[in-house]
Amino acid sequence: MMSKRTTFLAGALALLSTSVLAAENVEMFSTSGCGCCIGWMKHLEDAGFEVENENLAMADLYAKKMEAGLRQGQTSCHTGFVGGYVVEGHVPAAEIKRLLAEKPDAIGLTVPDMPAGSPGMGESDEPYEVLLVGRDGSSTVYARYPR
């Protein structure tokens, strides 16, 4: 027979594991046939995320980015949503995991444009930044690559 404390701890652990699992699902939007988008999706899946991708017309994809709170200059070719955050472009899985662990008061992360060497864009030593986008639309450097 389980004590009240054991029952409570088991319930709390079950809720925690459910919320962590839910945060591992990425809802992704891209345009059809984009090879680098497929590469980024594979990068996330290799890192343990479950990714569901929906192809949209370019105008619909852009509208989704703007609805998420992104501004011009903060966008890339695909948009993802995970754990209540937007993840725009070729953001490394490690930074998404960090975002989900730290839970900053922000709309999410972006890697603007499509820098060489970012996940899905092939090998390169070209430097790029992962930006944290605040609720006011401003951005700060969250990480720099290569490390």
Image: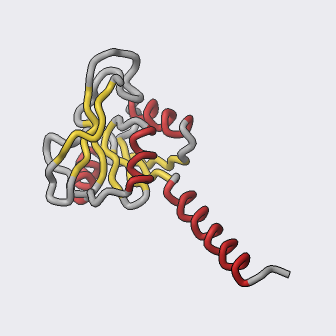
Asked whether, in this view, residue 65 is left or right of residue 36, the answer is: left
Residue furthest right in the image:
1
Q: Residue at x 22, y 39 (%)?
A: 141
Residue at the (26%, 57%) spot, across then down:
106
Q: Quadrant of the N terminus?
A: bottom right
Residue at 22% in and 42% down: 75
Q: Position of residue 89 (x, y in %)?
A: 32, 39
Residue 77 location, quadrant: top left
* Left or right relative to 48: residue 55: left
Picture layout, residue 45 above or below residue 17 = above
- Choose between 97 and 34: the one closer to the eye: 97
The residue drawn where x is 23% and y is 32% is 113
- What is the quadrant of the C terminus in the image? top left
- Percent across and percent down for residue 64 are 27, 55
Q: Nearer the viewer, residue 107 or 147?
A: 147
Q: Position of residue 96 (x, y in %)?
A: 41, 45
Residue 138 appears at what percent x and percent y? 14, 50
> Number of numbered discs present?
0
Is residue 87 or residue 77 the one in the foreground?
A: 87
80 sits left or right of 72 in the view: right
Q: Return the residue found at the far bottom.
A: 4
